[in-house]
Image (spheres, rainbow, N blue to C red):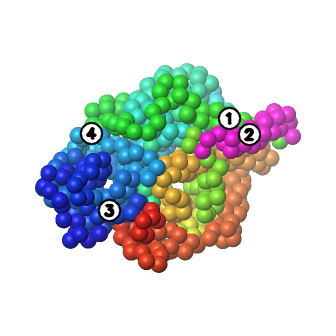
Amino acid sequence: MTPAKSTPLSPAETVVDNYFPLTASPAPFPKAPMGVMMSPAQLTPFSPAETVVDSYFPLTASPAPFPKAPMGVMMSPAQLTPFSPAETLVDGYFPFTASPDSPSKAPIGVTLSPARKYVLFSIFCLAPFLDAFNNSVLISAMPSLIIDLEITEGQSTWIMSVFQLTFASFLLVSGRISDVYNPKFAFIIGVGSLGVISLGAGFASDKILLIVLRAFSGIALSLIIKIFPEPVAQARALSAFGGSGSVGNILGLFVGAIFIQYASWHWTFWFLALLTVPIAFIGWLLIPREKAPSEGPKLKGLAKFLSLDLVGVSTLTVALVLLIFSLTSGSSSGWASPLVLVPLIISIIMIVSFFLWEKRIPVETAAIPPHTWFYPNFAVLISIALMPYFWWTTMFTMYTTLWQEVYGWSAMMTAAHMIPIGGLAFIVSMTGGFSRLISPKWIILTGQVLTIIACLLLSFATGPEKYFQFVIPGFILGTSGCQLMYTHTNIAIFKATPPAVAGTIGAIFNGALQLGSAIGLAASSSIETSVEAKHGGFDKYYGRAAVFYFLMGVLSLQALGVLIFYRVLPAESIDLEPKTVSGASSTENIAGEKCTEVQGKKGIC
């Protein structure tokens, strides 16, 4: 529809009528077919002061209303003038976009000032920041913590891995929890619980209690990651998220080092509590509450709880814990011992049972709906997602213990030598826009090749004098490669999947990142310990070099998989070029996507 065709009938008709035409007018505007994206010209805002929330759900009357859009039309960010060029957590925090099959949900009378939006965006970016910070702050403290609590090298892996396991598993239902119970309260409870648990962990004097509290920390943190950028114009949002995680990584190392050098490891947990509890309070004050939909099914009480796939997630969590236990026990008990084989076999059976369970239950309640594996390139991209956090966590833990316990470096000196990892990750996280010029396949392959070269260089870093010769180049290449994999795998996976399942896909992707880190760290630790037992012990570099050879092998297999199985999708299938249908016109959204208008039929995007 052109503006000329959309002359309003009367000044009394409201913007609400135009967006959600619930009442009939004597002579309604010409209607676009269902599912059609409206162009910016068709949706010229009433006033320059209109806010993001006003743009999405304008609730005030206009003397010159917008053209009518039928019920269920999803407007793109460009069509609705968001406060930033890319859709952000503030723009998309609450799931208000309607589909032809579901009613719209709009918060009544909510208006956000620009200052409030920026504060909220900063708060939501703390999700990846807290994830990275929660791990890296402990890495600096790990040598002291091992001595104080008399933790073995194998047990120290659990302090990192158990957090990542529960975080990864419960990410799969965290979005559903937010949908069922309210995203605002899920965020606040998650952040607040993380603070309280961290406070308790600071007082822990037993290694088992600390490991249990770390497991609950992972569950709490999973609740705060609710929204993932839509596949339209998500490059800048992903850059902001990746950048905040990189800052969390390097800042955590320095904060942990400061506490170890001038206080104790207990303060690494207490500082996290001091950071998160105020965030929960600010979120309670500033995050607008989502109104329940006036139409559609309403779940109450036990029905709400049963709609969560807790059986599936619990099964997967236990299976992964048993898998990690078998991997960490192999180096000390022997790979053929019952202590390794029994939990390994049980974990495999439980993982198979998890996928069979997911196939049986309704798709809308499944943590990982079976059909997701059949989206183009989905399985390949999830396998790639296992690597970035795996590589980073291995570098941090392995070099921290080497530099502090073998070379005798201070915690602060160790953190300073890690700066190339955090700095380069932040810079490379800004390359999201490259995916518009080059297929993500080739960018991901470039990242894999860079990381393979990095592992080769690091395998020769046999002493402190080799830091500038091998470690710095290895860190630069490896971090650049992993950040390229992280950013462009994220972009590619959203391009290949429908917007309607963005929340589920985002949860699976982020779960894969954490799962790769947990299992990879356990495998690396086991390999290092096994080699050190036969070749020179902990003070020698043979075990660490073996870990780099293992990483090179995994990366090579992944690169081969990308070359063979990753299909470069036609422009039409990833919504970057116009779709042409006989007798159809099209309107364009922010990403250059074209939505086909077919007379009398639902628009296709």
**Element type at marker 2?**
helix
Residue type, label 1: Thr
Residue type, label 4: Ile
**Element type at marker 1?**
helix
Asked whether disc 1 touches disc 2, contact meaning CB atoms under 8 Å apart, the reply is: yes
Q: Nearer the viewer, residue 471 or 280?
A: 280
The residues bearing labels 4 and 3 have C-alpha atoms spaced at a distance of 25 Å
Q: Nearer the viewer, mark 4 or mark 1?
A: 4
Q: Nearer the viewer, mark 4 or mark 2?
A: 4
For disc 3, the marked residue is 31
Residue type, label 3: Lys
Q: Which class describes the residues within 10 Å of circle 2: few (<14), some (14-19), or many (20+)?
A: some
For disc 2, the marked residue is 353
The residues bearing labels 3 and 1 have C-alpha atoms spaced at a distance of 49 Å
Dot placed on the residue nearer the N-terminal end, 2 or 3: 3
**Element type at marker 3?**
loop
Dot placed on the residue nearer the N-terminal end, 1 or 2: 1
Residue 108 is marked as 4
Q: Nearer the viewer, residue 76 or 199?
A: 76
Asked whether disc 4 touches disc 3, contact meaning CB atoms under 8 Å apart, the reply is: no
Query: Residue 155's image quarter?
Result: top right
Residue type, label 2: Ser
For disc 1, the marked residue is 315
Q: Which class describes the residues within 10 Å of circle 1: few (<14), some (14-19), or many (20+)?
A: some
Query: Residue 1's image quarter?
Result: bottom left
Q: Please, which residue is most extreme toward the front here?
A: 26
Q: Looking at the image, which residue is at 73% across and 48% down?
A: 527
Which segment is the magenta one?
336-363
- Residue 158 visible in image: no
